[in-house]
């Protein structure tokens, strides 16, 4: 971990607290009508950063929390919280990280470096996907689904920064979008997992 990354990790709690005080954190969108997707998420695939194909069909009957990640972000410490959430709901939840360099060059590393960084600094055991775009015209297939109401049933929100989170229920419905400032351990997310 670089000095800058260590400083950002140290100041992460301050970043969350400041966001709450300034009412910057906490933006989310919830699927209140429980709209079902027109294209099941279980038809999607993605590759891990080690080149292994992951079929979303393997997650049927579980919650899935998807998040776009970056190694040089003020929210990078959320990797530890994502790992805690994965362990807390083992067998009921799978966290999937999608490293992306879409926000100010905060993920300059390649896939091998990202895997090493996540494992050695945060003990990440959940799948980390191949680095790709999560917004704009070149976004990957999974993020196309997450941000297209014609596919997911209701949501059009793209990530606004690194560590935005999307929660899928065991039936395959996208139930919520949560901005970076909402910790994965917050009741807004963890409280929705049963």
Image: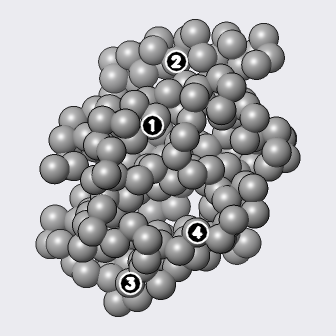
Q: Which residue is mark 3?
A: 40
Query: Which numbered disc, 4 or 2, marks the residue closer to the eye?
Result: 4
Nearest to N terminus: mark 3 or mark 4: 3
Which residue does the numbered mark 4 point to in the structure image? 54
**How many residues crowd around disc 2 within 10 Å: few (fewer than 14), some, or many (20 or more)?**
some
In this view, the mark in front (3 or 4): 4
> Observer-nearest residue: 67 or 103?
67
Q: Quadrant of the N terminus?
A: top right
**What is the x, y in percent for residue 115?**
72, 41
Does label 2 or label 3 sit earlier along the sequence? 2
Q: Which residue is mark 1?
A: 82
Where does label 2 land, which residue? 12
Contact, mark 1 vs mark 3 (Cβ under 8 Å):
no
Q: Position of residue 111 (x, y in %)?
A: 79, 49
Mark 3 lies on a secondary structure that is loop
Left or right relative to 185: residue 45: right
Judging depth in this view, the residue of 74 and 87 nearest the camera is 87
Q: Is residue 175 above or below residue 160?
A: below
- From mark 3 to mark 4, how far is it between C-alphas? 15 Å
Element on which disc 4 rests: strand
Residue at the spot 18% in from the left edge and 41% down from the top edge: 191
Q: Residues within 10 Å of mark 4 (few under 14, many from 20)?
A: some
Label 1 vs label 4, nearer the camera = 4
Can I make out residue 15 in this image?
yes
Give the farthest residue toward the front.
Answer: 91
Q: CA distance from mark 1 to mark 2?
A: 14 Å
């Amino acid at each position: 971990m670089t000095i800058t990354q260590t400083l950002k990790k140290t100041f992460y709690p301050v970043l969350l607290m400041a966001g709450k005080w300034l009412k910057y954190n906490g933006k989310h969108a919830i699927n209140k009508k429980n709209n079902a997707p027109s294209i099941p998420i279980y038809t999607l695939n993605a590759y891990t950063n080690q080149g292994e194909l992951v079929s979303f069909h393997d997650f049927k009957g579980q919650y899935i929390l998807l998040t776009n990640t970056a190694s040089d972000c003020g929210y990078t410490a959320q990797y530890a919280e994502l790992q805690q959430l994965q362990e807390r709901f083992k067998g009921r939840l799978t966290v999937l990280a999608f490293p992306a360099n879409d926000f100010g060059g905060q993920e300059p590393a390649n896939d091998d470096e990202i895997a090493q960084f996540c494992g050695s600094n945060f003990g990440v055991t959940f799948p980390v996907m191949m680095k790709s775009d999560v917004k704009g015209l070149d976004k990957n297939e999974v993020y196309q689904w997450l941000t297209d109401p014609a596919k997911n049933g209701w949501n059009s929100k793209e990530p606004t920064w690194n560590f935005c989170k999307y929660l899928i229920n065991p039936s395959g419905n996208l139930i919520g979008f949560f901005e970076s400032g909402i910790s994965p351990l917050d009741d807004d997310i963890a409280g929705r997992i049963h």
